[in-house]
Amino acid sequence: MTGEYQHTIDAKGRLFIPAKLRDELGSVFYVTLSMDPCLSAYSAESWQQFSDKVNAMPYVKQRKMRPLFAYAAKCELDSQGRILLPQNLREFAKLTKDVTVVGNNNHAEFWDTASWNELGAIEKQAENIAAVMKELEF
């Protein structure tokens, strides 16, 4: 998934999902916590792959993944292309009004726009991109 899209959450906690990402996420997908202060959204297929990988781990390691499953929400698009984000997930990512929806390879991320802009100011610097490419041996 790729791209950056600006949207807002309405008073009922609904977020519009861009058409390009709806095609990739599908009409039903999973939203959960992230390692960053944002939410991650996975298509049903990607979520199943993730779940299968966790299932293959020893139980002691599976337990470490508990928060990602405990706080996950199965989201369904409404007729206007929106999903309802549960309050606990909105609070985790500090999503109150302005949201930036970002494609990130096999998933999408939902960021508070101010937080995304702050992070982006650092991440999109040429020297940072060069350092990451070198670190990842590209």
Image (cartoon, rainbow, N blue to C red):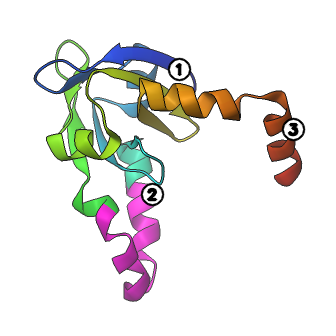
Residue type at numbered disc 2: Gln
Residue type at numbered disc 1: Glu
Note whether residue 119 is visible.
yes
Quarter containing the N terminus = top right
Element on which disc 2 rests? helix
Quarter containing the C terminus = top right
Query: Which residue carries the number 1 mark?
Result: 4
Cα separation between marks 3 and 2: 31 Å
Callout in the foreground (1, 2): 1
Query: Which residue carries the number 3 mark?
Result: 130
In this rendering, the answer to whether 31 lies above or below 50 is above
Magenta region: 48-67
Q: Residue at x 16, y 40 (%)?
A: 87
Element on which disc 1 rests? strand
Write down the quadrant of residue 22 in the picture: top left
Kindly identify which numbered label has been placed on residue 49. 2
